[in-house]
Amino acid sequence: MSSENTLGTRLRRLREDRQLSIEELAEKSRCHGDQIRQIEQGALIPSLTPLIALSRALGVRLGTLLDDAPVDGPAIFRPEEASSVIRFSGKDPAATGSNLDFYAMAGGKKDRHMEPFLIHVKPRSGQTPPLSGHEGEEFLYVVSGAILVNYGKTSFTLEAGQSIYYDSIVPHDVQAAGDRNATILAVVYMPG
């Protein structure tokens, strides 16, 4: 089963466990009902912003939507064993592709407060999507290639070995700089 379908199944199960209709969850999360339907059907993986809003509305941490087998003890990430990739289709609910491939690095770590990801960032074709923000903080470290971070009204180009730490509430977007792939380590923190 693809990670997209796993996420959709998990979202539907959490929503139904709380006896919420799609419309009620849409109202609580301020996400569009059609977007929630598409996520549950496995047709869409949105950007982190709606997933964070949905997890908050359901009263769970983001990691609960991304993995559902928490274990005690440390989480070990080995890239060669990383089978679960999450391909976010971005901020456009009509998008069918993905320029961000997320590998959860703490999958299963029980009661975590940070969400670390290894992300392959592909060059984006077409227009830059609108910026969006969410609660919390993010730390990005460029492993290879270069990225462009649009943050509020400012843009930063970062190359391998460089990093940025910012408040996620400020609208932002991350993309590959130029026409080459990049790899970043991203750690997302959301207050409880």
Image (tube, rainbow, N blue to C red):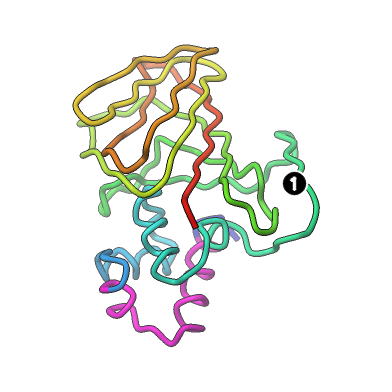
- Residue 177 lies in quadrant: top left
Percent position (x, y) of residue 69? Answer: 70, 63
Between 100 and 115, the one lying in front of the other is 115
Q: Residue furthest front?
A: 192
Which portion, as a residue range, is magenta? 5-27
**Image point (26%, 39%), residue name:** 171
Q: Residue furthest bottom?
A: 19
Does 13 appear in magenta?
A: yes
Percent position (x, y) of residue 124? Answer: 32, 28
Percent position (x, y) of residue 105? Answer: 65, 42
Does 73 appear in magenta?
A: no
Q: Residues within 10 Å of mark 1 (few under 14, many from 20)?
A: some
Q: Amino acid at mark 1?
A: Ala
Query: Could you tell me what secondary structure mostly forms the magenta stretch?
Result: helix
**Image point (44%, 71%), residue name:** 58
Residue beneath label 1, please?
A: 75
Residue 50 to residue 32: above or below = above
Secondary structure under tag 1 reads: loop
| 110 to the left or right of 180 | right
Percent position (x, y) of residue 119? Answer: 52, 33
Between 138 and 191, the one lying in front of the other is 191
**Image point (32%, 67%), residue name:** 29
